[in-house]
Structures are given as structure tokens and as C-alpha cells.
Image (cartoon, grey):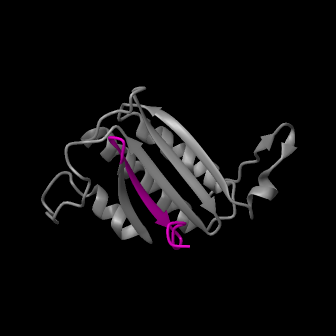
Amino acid sequence: MRRQMKTTRGGHDVSDKRKSEPWVRTVRLPWTIESVPRVRQEVVADLGAGKLPDSVVEEAETVVAELVANAILHGRPLPDGTVRVRWRARPPRVEIEVTDGGSDKQPKPKPQADWAPSGRGLRIVRSLAYEWGVNDEDGHTMVWAALGGASRRRI
């Protein structure tokens, strides 16, 4: 069960407003695998305060964890030594973007190997996301996923 958080901005309750209006949040995290549990908690707390189905919040928690872990394990940090995570909520949809300093290889799901101890991250993202993709720009790699419906890239 999801906890409801009351968020205030300048002393004004914004939790009711957030339930129907879109919002964006961006965080920069240290380039360490310990950032994964932190971003999971932040995503659940933030999205749980809005009008998103529980299933979308739970999927977002898994997707952000997989994308951040993949960035840290397979990419490079941004010039400031971080990984950037942005989520855009437009109930009932949410888009998640994870940007790192790029890699020598384009992120893509590995072929299925049930016995492998790793390599399932992007397959998990692909199975949960309505759509997902990779953008390379200025040497940075951004992997994005849309949950709960089509992304802004189509509508």
C-alpha cells in the first residue's frame, strides 16, 4: 500500500493541485550504486503524492532502479560526477529519463539467458514500459521510458 505525502511549497498545500496537473522533478545523484535505493525512494514518495495508479508507481520504482543501475554499471558519469534522473508525471502517465556521460556501446537489451546473474535490466524496462528508447546527444546518453500510456514523444 502506498503512503500519501503532503507536499508544501511556500507554505501552501500542493498535494491536491498535483493530483491532476503535470509536474516534473529532476535529481542529480552521486555516481555510485548506492544511489539506486535513494532514487527509488524519491520516485515513490513523489509519484505516490500524485494521482497515479499504484501499478504505475510500482513500475516506475522498478524502471528507475534498473535505468540508474545500468547507467552506473555501463556508462560514464556526467562532467560533474553525477547521473541525472528526471521524471514527468501527467496522470495517469509518467516518463522517466536517466542521463549519463555516455558509453562506448548503445544501451540495448541483452539476449535472454536465464542462467546469467545479470543482464536483465533493459528487458525488465522493456516489459514494463509502454514505450522506451535511447537518445544520444553531445556525448551523453539518455534512456527514457513511458509508463501508463504513450509518451509526450508521440502525443
Residue 89 pos. (x, y %): 61, 59
Q: Is residue 1 visible?
A: no
Residue 78: in magenta span: no
The residue at 17%/51% (across/down) is: 117
Quadrant of the image containing the N terminus: bottom right
Residue at the far front in the pictured view: 138
- Which residue is rendered at x = 69% and y = 54% of the image? 49
Q: Name the residue at the top extreme.
A: 80
- Above or below for 92 versus 35: below
Residue 121 or 54: which is nearer the viewer? 121
Between residues 56 and 145, which one lies in front from this camera angle? 145
- Horizontal side, residue 105 vs residue 88: left or right: left
For the C terminus, the quadrant is bottom right
Relative to the observer, which residue lies in front, 151 or 137? 137
With 139 as the anchor, is 23 left or right in this view?
Answer: right
What range is drawn magenta here? Answer: 137-155
Q: Position of residue 47 (x, y in %)?
A: 62, 55
Task: Name the residue rendered at 20%, 48% in the picture.
Answer: 105
Residue 138 belongs to magenta span: yes
Q: Please give the name of the residue rendered at 44% of the width and 61% of the height, measured from the top-left corner.
A: 145
Relative height, residue 130 to residue 116 (above, below): below
**Nearest to the observer: residue 32 or residue 104:** 104
Q: Is residue 150 left or right of residue 100?
A: right
Q: Position of residue 16 (x, y in %)?
A: 81, 57
Q: Quadrant of residue 121?
A: bottom left
Count of residue discs: 0
Is residue 97 visible in the rendered image? The answer is yes
Residue 132 against residue 99 in the figure, above or below: below
Residue 53 falls in which quadrant of the image? bottom right
Residue 13 at x, y percent in the picture: 84, 47
